[in-house]
Image: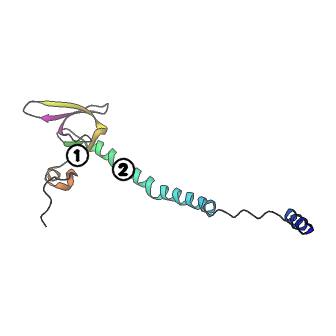
Amino acid sequence: MLYALMVLAQAEGEKPAPVPDDPFLKMLPMLALMMLAFYFLLIRPQRRREREQREMLFKTLKKNDEVLTSGGIIGIVANIKDDNEVTLKLDESSNVRIRILRTSIVRILTPKDQGSPAATDAVKAGPPPAK
């Protein structure tokens, strides 16, 4: 019994064992710093370039340009209004025209773009290649 009291007395007098440090908590500030650097070095400059390209597209847009919209409609610009509205001519024989927002125009098509498969970004469906 005396031995049990001595063990309990020693156990009460000792300091509790320190909690082991979590390696994730030490890595968290470094991870945040890397994400911040990634944003400022890669993402932000790319967004700026894209915005400049869009502005250039809108500045060079003129009547009789063939354009592609974000909905996949290809038409010829018939009229450009100041309030970001563009009238597209879809079919000349029946005089079909639609009004769209200028921001929905994705690309101005040139004659060389119309024939190239890379310009339309479309995947052609067909039979699989023979083995």
User: Residue 15: x percent and y percent?
Assistant: 83, 64
Residue type beneath disc 1? Ile
User: Residue 63: x percent and y percent?
Assistant: 19, 38
* Residue 44 vs residue 21, the one in the foreground: 21
Q: Residues within 10 Å of mark 2 (few under 14, many from 20)?
A: few
Query: Up-down: is 116 above or below 54?
Result: below
Classify mark 1: helix, strand or loop. strand
The mark found on residue 108 in the picture is 1
| Colouring used for the render | rainbow
The residue stretch that appears in magenta:
73-94
Magenta part mainly helix, strand or loop? strand
On the image, which quarter does residue 11 sit in?
bottom right
- Pick the quarter of the image with the C terminus: bottom left
Q: Residue furthest left?
A: 93
CA distance for labels 2 and 1: 15 Å
User: For mark 2, what is the residue?
Assistant: 50
| Residue beneath the point at 37% across and 47% down | 51
For marks 2 and 1 on the same chain, the one whose residue lies earlier in the sequence: 2
* Residue 123 vs residue 114, the one in the foreground: 123
Query: Up-down: is 8 above or below 43?
Result: below
